[in-house]
Amino acid sequence: MIIWSGRGILSIAILLISFLILNFIIPFEFRQYIFTLSFFITGAFSWYFGKKWNTNGKIMIDKASGQEVLLKPNHSLFWIKMQYWGIVFAVLGCLTLILTFI
């Protein structure tokens, strides 16, 4: 079961889409790098768009109490914000890159 909020599901979608596209583009000799490139592409996407989409907030005024309320967007996957998934995917990319050379 995948739990997401806002556009957080795009992190998984980009991972799957980049894996499928790279499967057709990369020659057969370099197939061991498909996971690595997919993780790096998804990491860059998640970091950039997570920072962009999660930083904009709106200040609204509650009519009943007259107090200001800050409404911040939440684009997350498994309760972790998208920009932090960028770091996770980058680390996974580094690990798969190291494991291909061992």
Image: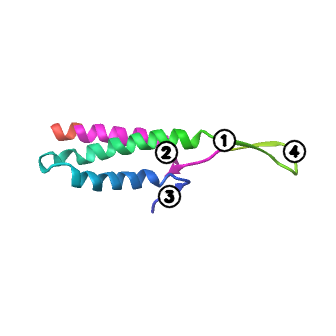
Q: Label 3, label 2: how many angstroms apart (C-alpha)? A: 13 Å
Q: Residue furthest left?
A: 29
Of circles 2 and 1, the one toward us is: 1
The first of marks 4 and 2 along the sequence is 4
Which residue is found at the position 11% from the left and 47% from the top?
A: 29
Tag nearer the camera, 4 or 3: 4
Q: Distance between the residues labelled 4 and 3?
A: 34 Å
The residue under label 1 is 57
Q: Distance between the residues labelled 4 and 1?
A: 19 Å
Quadrant into which the C terminus falls: top left
Secondary element at image label 4: loop
Q: What residue type is labelled 2?
A: Met
Mark closer to the chain start, 4 or 1 = 1
Q: Tell me which segment is drawn in magenta.
A: 72-97
Which mark is drawn over residue 3?
3
At 18% across and 41% down in the image, what residue appears? 100
- In percent of width and height, residue 23 lies at 23, 54
Q: Residue 82 carries which label?
A: 2
* Quadrant of res 60: top right
Label number found at residue 66: 4
Q: Is residue 41 magenta?
A: no
Residue 20: x and y in percent read: 28, 56
Which amino acid does the dot numbered 3 rest on? Ile
Q: Crowding at label 1, few (<14), some or many (≥20) Cα neighbours within 10 Å? A: few
Q: What is the spatial separation of the Cα atoms under label 2 and label 1, in whole angstroms? A: 16 Å
Where 19 falls versus 56 (above or below)?
below
Secondary structure under the numbered disc 2 in the rendered image: helix
